[in-house]
Amino acid sequence: MSDVVGYEVRGRIAVVTVDNPPVNALSHAVRMGLIEQFDRAVGDDGAEAIVLIGAGRTFPAGADIREFDQPLRDPHLVVIVDHFDTIKKPVVAAIHGTALGGGLELMLGCHFRVAAPTARVGTPEVKLGIFPGAAGTQRLPRVAGLDHALELIVMGEPIGAAKAFDYGIVDEIVDGDLLGGAIVFAEKILDNGTPRRVSSEPKEGIGSPDQFAEVIQKYRDLANRRMRGQESPHEAIGSVIDGLEMPYERAVAADRERFPRCKDSDQSKALRYAFFAEREAAKIPSIGKEIQPRPVETGAVIGTGTMGGGIIMCFANAGIPVTAVETEQAALDRGMGMIEKNYQGMVDRGRIDAAEMTRRLGLISTSLDYGSAGEADLIIEAAFEDLDLKKKIFTQLDGVAKPGTILATNTSYMDINQIAAATDRPEDVIGLHFFVPANVMKMLEVVRTNMSSPEAVATGMRVARRFGKVGGLAGVSHGFVANRSRAPLVREAIFMVEEGASPAQVDEVLREFGMPMGVLAVSDLSGIDVSWRMRQSLAYLRDPEERYVHLADQLCELGRFGRKTGKGWFSYGDGGSLPVPDPEVDEIAAVVAAKQGIERRQIDDTEILDRCLYAAVNEGIKIVEEGVALRASDIDIMWQYGFGFPRWRGGIMYHADRVGLPEVLARVEEFHEAHGKLWEPSALLRELVASGGSFTGA
Ligand code: CAA
């Protein structure tokens, strides 16, 4: 008897329940259990129809991803789905939670489908480097039409029950008791003699690929834009096309060959690694389940500049009332104007409707008085990057905030230990480092100081989730985890331009690798002067023995601050956004190089990539060694969600593992020899190479 799939009969309806916490993944045991219990229902004279449901929080949320590292074991899910076609008793799927991937394919195999209003359904397989290989690419177009099917299959985003109903994926929405409603639905089917619907049968309107050339191209273009370099969306489209060209059985047979190829690809392995790394990042070993995050029902944000405005939107988007605090009315008006403009943009793009915009704006109140932040459960300071200013603000906040308020600073690199020490409650102070734009980027670095309490840190991690972001823990260190590990990449990019590469060559190599933008074009976008000012304020800390980014300073001294001044590493014409190579930069670089006695040379693309990536990897492993990051995989998640690093490459640390740490160390040593102390190999890297270890287990 299966212990993960239950069976009972209620009246004349058999109820088969998948019970495999936490998400009822369709493991081998569940697949075996489904066969056993469906056979039982078919043979049970007391059962005239069958309802399939998930116990606990969800209908099956897909295949068990952990099994993908092993050979596929019979019975394959598609065999079960196909078997449903032959069952003469009506089978009704009752869906709640998240019916994803194999879960959606299972429900497509059922003859009817009812859902709770809060249910979500989808095929996120492309995000794991695969495609809906249990006939989802064949059945979904027949059920929902080709356009809707491709939308789900290629983009991988789940949809809500109401949309699933509109798409014909769900037949009825059940308010209240889902199982009761599904049983009533099944009885109605029996009483009315409604014929079973078999989703593998040929469907009118599903014709040849030529007929659908336009819609297919639309999704190819979307995939190229949103998932550049990723193969799985194209494999998914290929499988859908097979279904248009071949009868169902042959298309499914073709999928059987396509699926293992995708599953065993490097991209799929990297994407699966990223899936689990993301979940791991949420876990902090020293903070157990007994530590309760503090409730955050209200928020306040100090400062309504670009960052502050984005953070205010995060609160409002999450439905949390927030007070925006500024020192001057004009700044407050500017900040609120920017927020309204951003929301209007979301309405114009159809992301939210006007009523939702009004609701979100209604959650924001404004004030010129710090005292009005006093009752907030969480106050996030987003003032200028000036340590004395931040300390002053925190002392003031300490004076007005109620006991228990979490005080957070959104700094990118300041010493938060010092900021916390400016209050009488350092245990309630944390860093919340948002990425630009704060309301869009999914990463939130939660910074623990020497004194932060576990409750304060747990609250930061919980808030990340409520904001729809991924929280990652960092210790105090210049640039914390994300920016500190990225700084050496920027540094090497600049050095290589001094040495003879062009900004366009450097950026193209990184784009080719999969980065959404080249690193120098990103600097132009955010403003080269930002790090220039930071270098100036920290000049007293600089080691004179270390090579310095003179070229970046020189560009700033010439007023080339990036896009906002029309010129930076590239030029931008009249307010344009497209980086155009500028020969002037080459001339400036030649002068800067000559002053340093650097002989300029041709630099090949491999050197550019290796120096950029391995400089970051070497710093990354030092960050782990020092305990500033909990694990190497957290760095990978921060790069994905903070900097747009291609998820299908796993991350910089995972990439290094795949290349092989001995090879990475050899290159680091080579660069150390050639470029000096900035390339000092990390001790942990040496240790791992000696012991045959790895950063991420890859
Ligand atoms: N396989 C194995 N483990 C899974 C899993 C899966 N499909 N889905 C979730 N889990 C695990 C998570 O790793 C996590 O484990 P830990 O607690 O040990 O970290 C636990 O379940 C809970 O997951 P979340 O923390 O993500 O919980 P959530 O409530 O935030 O989200 C979810 C739930 C929306 C289902 C989310 O977990 C998710 O998106 N899961 C993946 C869904 C998916 O990709 N399905 C398709 C799989 S491929 C497939 O189905 C192909 C096929 O059949 C042929």
Image (cartoon, rainbow, N blue to C red):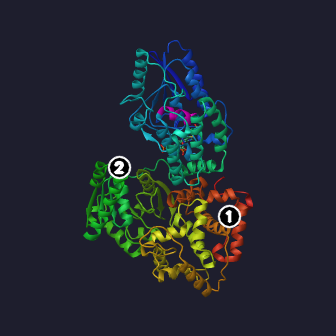
Mark 1 is on which residue type?
Leu
Q: Which residues are magenta?
A: 135-143
Q: Which residue is mark 1?
A: 685
For the point 53% across and 76% down, the residue is: 582
Q: Main secondary structure of the magenta part?
A: helix
Q: Secondary structure at mark 1?
A: helix
Query: Would residue 661 appear left or right of 183 to someone viewing this image?
Result: right
Q: How many marks?
A: 2
Amino acid found under the numbered disc labelled 2: Ile
Residue 691 vertical placement versus 185 (above, below): below
Q: Which mark is residue 352?
A: 2
143 sits to left or right of 353: right
Q: Nearer the viewer, residue 568 or 72?
A: 568
Label 2: which secondary element:
loop
In magenta segment, residue 523: no
Residue 140 inside the magenta-drawn segment: yes
Name the residue furthest bottom: 595
Question: In which quadrant will I find the N terminus?
Answer: top right
**Label 2 vs label 1: CA separation?**
47 Å
Note whether residue 566 is visible: yes
**Where is residue 138 shown, x and y percent of the image?**
56, 34
